[in-house]
Amino acid sequence: MTDEIPLGILMLDTDFPRPPGDVGHAASWRMPVLFARVKGASVRAVVRDDPEKLLDLFAEAGNGLADRGAVGLITSCGFLAALQKPLAARLTVPLAASSLLQIPKLPGPVGVITYDSRTLGPAHFLGVGADPATPVVGLPDNGAFHAMIEGGAGYDAAALCHEAVDAARQLQNSVPNLAAIVLECTNLPPFSADIARATGLPVYDILTLGHEFHAGLAAGVCA
């Protein structure tokens, strides 16, 4: 049965709340999931520094999940798109490092909402075969997401939802004929439905990627 084969999730070294819908909550997934926290992989280390310095740690954790039965691996940060190729080469099971992998498969124009628009750049898009000129809108530096993820603030669902929807509207207003939105940040999926309602556009996130990725891999195992 494909729904009995686990997906592995490489988690950053963080401690903020992860409600259902978040990549790090088991109830977000239709199949079993296995988690591995990569020690030292802080948000700063992955988003603002050079994540390739953590390649050994991610590879070790990923292969550990494979040994525990994971059919494939995803991660808890879309910025790991930059490691898609080098990390995949060191793993014993397939990797889908970032929701940005969905961009090349979608009819354009496609826009991205990201945790940090200042540091999401060409290396991340090129790492997953996407156009480096893909339009991007970032969550505000002084907003609820940054306060929760890096500032230790509590989980304010209403504020987070408002921030996510506002970013989506900014993106839609700035990109003529926008056809789809991809959420880089894996903490945004609890608000994917709100974004879709507000914009009338399809929304793709780490959950849509993970479910499709797992379905293909698990079907191959069971064939």
Image (tube, helix red, strand yellow):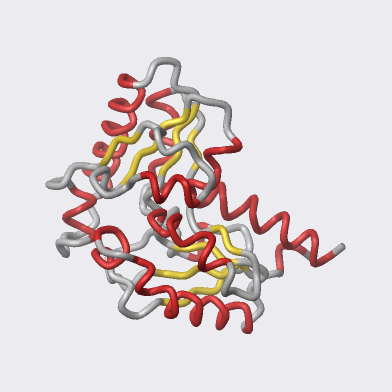
Residue 207 image offset from top left, x and y in percent = 52, 51
Which of the pair 205/111 is nearer the observer?
Answer: 111
Q: Is residue 39 above or below residue 149?
A: below
Residue found at x 35% / y 73%: 53
- In this view of the protein, can residue 187 be seen by the observer? yes
Please indicate whether residue 155 sits to the left or right of residue 206 in the image.
Answer: left
Residue 158 seen: no
| Above or below 86: residue 168 | above
Percent across and percent down for residue 221 are: 80, 67
Relative placement, left or right, of 153 versus 93 is left
Count of numbered tags:
0
Judge whether 63 appears above or below 178 on screen: below
Which residue is found at the position 27% from the left and 43% from the top? 117
Horizontal and vertical percent for residue 155? 24, 56
Residue 220 location, quadrant: bottom right
- Residue 64, picture quadrant: bottom right
Residue at the location (63% across, 63% down)? 31
Image point 27% across, 67% down: which residue? 45
Residue 126 locus on image (x, y percent): 47, 46
Quadrant for the N terminus in the image: bottom right
Quadrant position of the C terminus in the picture:
bottom right
Task: Using the image as rendered, state which of residue 201 and residue 18 is in the foreground.
Answer: 201
